[in-house]
Amino acid sequence: MRPIDVIEGKVSVLDRADVDTDQIIPKQFLKRVERTGFGEFLFYDWIRDGEIELEPNPILVAGRNFGCGSSREHAPWALEDFGFEAIVAPSFADIFYSNCTKIGLLPAILSEEQCRAAAEAGEARIDVDDETVTCAAGVFEFAVEPDVKHRLLNGLDDIGITLENAGAIDTYEAGAAGRPAPVTTAL
């Protein structure tokens, strides 16, 4: 995972609330286990039917409750593979939010008015360390939990977080040879 500090550029707008993961990446495209190649199927039905058009800009501004529905990891993978580095919305489904942060896709929560202002501005700068979104309409603050912020700023996925404790793991494993294994009497 790459470290994220600042994301800036043009904004794509998906002015819809309650966008579920089935619309983000439909089920028929979930046959891969790699994290790549899903971007071409992002919002497949809506784009194919001409309901929406999206440019692969760094920032997507969306409506409330973005990423609701099933907990598929493929949804953040598709958004990232399409070209988005951050999603700005008034709210996110919890599991979707977590899945985004685990791959380095930033979900930033702003009020509906602030999202509308960022969308109208057409360009924005998101600073993860300062927890701000800056656009022509002003500077808006968002919150990132400290452990998530650490993960994003340092480019750490779950394995990277574990490896931060490699010394303690090695010390524990070195001492394990002198400890007896657990014994059970039940058969």
Image: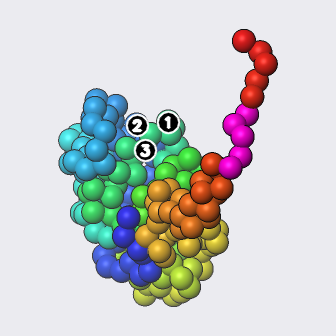
Q: Earlier in the sequence, mark 1 or mark 2?
A: 2
Magenta span covers which residues?
178-182
Query: Residue 72: x percent and y percent?
Result: 44, 39
- Quick one: quadrant of the N terminus? bottom left
Residues 22 and 129: in front is 129
Q: Are marks 1 and 2 in contact (CB under 8 Å)?
A: yes
The residue shown at (36%, 80%) is 8
The residue shown at (34%, 41%) is 25
The residue shown at (34%, 31%) is 27
Task: Provide the residue designation for mark 3.
Answer: 73
The correct choice, above or below, for 172 with respect to 40 in the image is below
- Mark nearer the viewer, 1 or 2: 1
The residue shown at (56%, 85%) is 130
Is residue 136 among the parts visible in the rendering? yes
Is residue 183 rendered magenta in the image?
no
Query: Residue 76: x percent and y percent?
Result: 40, 52
Q: Is residue 54 left or right of residue 74?
A: left
Task: Provide the residue designation for mark 1.
Answer: 70
Q: Earlier in the sequence, mark 3 or mark 2?
A: 2
SS for tag 1? loop
- Name the residue at the top extreme: 187
Task: Provide the residue designation for mark 2.
Answer: 22
Q: Amino acid at mark 2?
A: Asp
Mark 2, residues whose alpha carbon is within 10 Å: few (<14), some, or many (≥20)? many
Most common secondary structure along the magenta stretch: loop
Q: Amino acid at mark 1?
A: Ser
Q: Is residue 102 left or right of residue 144?
A: left
Q: Amino acid at mark 3?
A: Glu
